[in-house]
Image: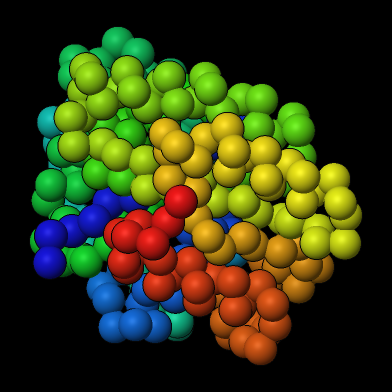
């Protein structure tokens, strides 16, 4: 199969981007796929969730690979790609990405640095998932230019959906100017508190407003304290709480992603 490169993007923080990259990636690996996770967020949250308590102390991160491409002095990807006990490979990220983003402003072909990197390694994987920073800056543009699909996690509240229009405009612009193959895989409702009528109303509103123009995953990820606990353990929800409601939800999401949206709204 052709490598599927998926950016998980929302310019708003706190929408479960990192949780989705981690659990979707490991869920796909559980089905036998070769999966690479990339932490493209200077906060290094995905790196923490993969077992590194102090990501800013790490050497050999995604920054080193991208700087090598930018400066035309590439380093071996093998020195940076790491393996997780749950069957995925990953490239860690940390605060050094902030400096890289600033330096990219004056770089030729600046939106395609990540694309050049992934062209070197994509053949080794079925899926590459990118955890983007909560902004629409140069790093996120690099992710969109390098991807063929976008997943947009949205928390089930009013403020979270207000920023979607700007995000979709950016994605359309990238598709038109940089990456004709870019498509929205779907909107993913996350952190849903099923006990609250308000949350259900927001979810229905998302489906009503966007369902005709943008795919919306049938799967909804429920809110659970167990998800927050996994970050301190360096494990996925499948390893930490395999029989819980969040694990079940991410299993369903994996099946939807595999099916390429055939049954989505």
The answer to whether 242 is drawn above or below residue 83 in the figure is below
Question: Residue 23: horizontal and vertical position, in percent?
Answer: 52, 68
Question: Residue 225: horizontal and vertical position, in percent?
Answer: 81, 68
The answer to which of 113 and 263 lies nearer the viewer is 263
The answer to which of 154 and 260 lies nearer the viewer is 260
The residue shown at (81%, 58%) is: 193
* Residue 248 visible, this angle: yes
Q: In the orientation shown, which residue stands out farthest toward the right? A: 196
Q: Is residue 200 left or right of residue 117?
A: right
Quarter-wise, where is residue 20 in the image? Answer: bottom right
Quarter-wise, where is residue 36 in the image? Answer: bottom left
The residue shown at (58%, 43%) is: 207
The answer to which of 199 and 247 lies nearer the viewer is 199
Q: Is residue 61 left or right of residue 193?
A: left
Q: Is residue 120 left or right of residue 97?
A: left
Question: Residue 263: horizontal and vertical position, in percent?
Answer: 39, 62
The answer to whether 135 is drawn above or below residue 55 in the figure is above
The residue shown at (37%, 27%) is: 171
């Amino acid at each position: 199969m052709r490598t599927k490169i998926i950016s998980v993007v929302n310019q708003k923080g706190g929408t479960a981007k990192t949780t989705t990259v981690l659990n979707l990636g490991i869920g796909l690996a559980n089905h036998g796929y070769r999966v690479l996770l990339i932490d493209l967020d200077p906060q290094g949250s995905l790196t923490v969730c993969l077992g590194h308590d102090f990501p800013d102390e790490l050497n050999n991160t995604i920054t080193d690979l991208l700087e090598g491409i930018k400066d035309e002095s590439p380093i071996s990807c093998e020195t940076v790609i790491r393996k997780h006990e749950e069957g995925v490979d990953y490239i860690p990220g940390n605060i050094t990405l902030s400096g890289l983003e600033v330096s990219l402003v004056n770089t030729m072909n600046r939106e395609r640095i990540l694309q050049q990197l992934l062209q070197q390694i994509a053949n080794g994987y079925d899926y590459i998932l990118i955890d983007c920073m909560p902004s629409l800056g140069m790093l996120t543009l690099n992710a969109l230019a390098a991807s063929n699909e976008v997943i947009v996690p949205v928390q089930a509240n009013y403020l979270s959906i207000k920023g979607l229009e700007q995000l979709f405009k950016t994605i359309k612009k990238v598709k038109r100017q940089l990456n004709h193959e870019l498509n929205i895989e779907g909107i993913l409702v996350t952190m849903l508190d099923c006990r609250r009528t308000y949350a259900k109303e927001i979810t229905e509103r998302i489906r009503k407003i966007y369902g005709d123009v943008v795919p919306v995953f049938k799967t909804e990820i429920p809110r659970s304290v167990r998800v927050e606990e996994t970050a301190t353990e360096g494990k996925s929800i499948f390893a930490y709480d395999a029989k819980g409601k969040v694990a079940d939800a991410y299993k369903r999401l994996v099946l939807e992603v595999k099916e390429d949206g055939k049954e989505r709204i």
